[in-house]
């Protein structure tokens, strides 16, 4: 008889039980650390409010899970569009630094051609 392969845990369960930076399992009833962030003004997370999303970070070449703040949540009122959770203060600092690195990368890309990622200039070549 063949054993069933374990199905991958749902995103919510993974978010609640896995460090957002190092990927270690976080046991129940253990202190966790984390933080929040604000999405770019041209990126609307409203349709994803209350959900967990995988976010790919270019700099560290890893995907992390974030919980998108519900519209009526304390996190949203405090200005956080999303939250992340880690197993230690060190991992929280590393993940925060990675998000800050992504912001800087985005700013450099935006200023390199004046159009920014995903945007096109008004001129076309024929």
Image (spheres, rainbow, N blue to C red):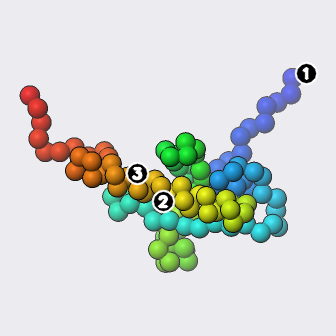
Rendered residue at 59%/50% (across/down): 64
Whether residue 51 can be seen here: no
Which of the two discs, 1 and 3, labels the residue nearer the N terminus?
A: 1
Cα separation, mark 1 vs mark 3, equals 51 Å
In this orientation, which residue lies closer to the viewer: 4 or 76? 76
Q: Which mark is residue 81?
A: none
Tag 1–tag 3 contact (CB < 8 Å) = no
Q: Is residue 23 left or right of residue 53?
A: right
Measured as percent of width and height from the top left, residue 27 is found at 82, 59
Element class at badge 2: helix
The residue wearing badge 2 is 100
Q: Is residue 67 left or right of residue 23?
A: left
Rendered residue at 47%/55% (across/down): 101
32 vs 9: above or below: below
Q: Quadrant of residue 107?
A: bottom left
Whether residue 117 can be seen here: yes
Measured as percent of width and height from the top left, residue 104 is found at 41, 56
The residue wearing badge 1 is 1
Q: Dot 1, how many residues are within 10 Å of its Cα: few (below 14), some (14-19), or many (20+)?
A: few
Quadrant that contains the N terminus = top right
The residue positioned farthest toward the top in the image shown: 1
């Amino acid at each position: 008889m063949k054993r069933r392969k374990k199905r991958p845990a749902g995103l919510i369960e993974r978010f609640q039980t896995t460090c957002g930076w190092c990927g270690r399992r976080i046991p129940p009833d253990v202190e966790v650390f984390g933080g929040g962030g604000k999405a770019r003004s041209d990126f609307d997370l409203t349709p994803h409010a209350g959900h967990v999303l995988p976010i790919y970070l270019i700099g560290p070449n890893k995907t992390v899970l974030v919980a998108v703040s519900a519209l009526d949540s304390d996190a949203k009122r405090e200005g956080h569009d999303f939250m992340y959770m880690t197993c230690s203060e060190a991992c929280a600092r590393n993940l925060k630094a990675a998000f800050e690195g992504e912001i800087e990368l985005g700013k450099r890309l935006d200023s390199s051609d004046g159009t920014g990622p995903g945007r096109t200039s008004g001129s076309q070549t024929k």
